[in-house]
Image: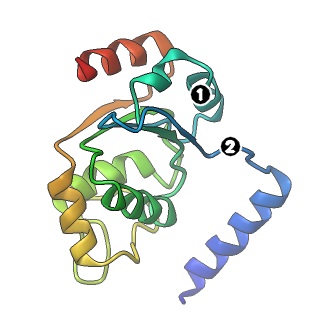
Amino acid sequence: MGLGRLLSDIAGKACEIILPIRHDVFMGNTNSSIALCTLSSMDLLLEVSRSDIMQYIAIAGRLLSENKGIDALVRYVTANEGIRCIVLAGRDSKGHRAGQSLLALWANGMDESGRIVGSLGRDAVLTVSMDQVTRFRAQINTIVDMIGVTDLGRIRKRILALSS
């Protein structure tokens, strides 16, 4: 493990202690093919979880990092083959650029060292296999880029259009 990754892990553990995040994922309609990612907007995630949007999406969750977070997302999506669309909304985390990194992964994949091609994130190196990334990229038909949008009405309107 490199020094940068070690420091990142230590900082992440410190954040978990200082700023515990109680909810990171909410399950919705298991028949839906849509996943909603609110990036670093925790309030938006809680607002979504209490709204009727949950009946139109399979899952709503957050994405804070361009490495461990995307690793977990790729594993979840490839284990749940019904998910075909991801809506990215909310604020992207500064420095990590998890939303931009996910878009780059979907468009460009990763190189042999696990680095996401085209990512602007500080440490966009994944631990998932090349096969998992290939399956993820083939499985997801659409990623809707609403990065920066925190208005629940706009997000709801887009999800309703996708689900019809």
Q: Which of the image's four quarters has the N terminus?
A: bottom right
Foreground pick, 45 / 11: 45
The x, y position of residue 27, in whole percent, is 53, 39
Report which quarter residue 43 is drawn in: top right
Residue under pointer 2: 23
Q: Residues within 10 Å of mark 1 (few under 14, many from 20)?
A: many
Please, what is the three-letter code of the amino acid marked with disc 2?
His
157 in relation to 137, above or below: above
Residue 108 appears anywhere in the view? yes
Q: Residue at x 27, y 70 (%)?
A: 132
Q: Residue at x 41, y 15 (%)?
A: 156
Q: Mark 2–mark 1 contact, CB under 8 Å?
A: yes
Q: Position of residue 136 (x, y in %)?
A: 24, 59
User: Looking at this view, is 16 or 77 the one in front?
Assistant: 77
Give percent across and percent down for residue 160.
32, 15
Which residue is the site of mark 1? 49
Q: Residue furthest right?
A: 18
Q: Is 155 situated above or below 129?
A: above
Q: Quadrant of residue 105?
A: bottom left
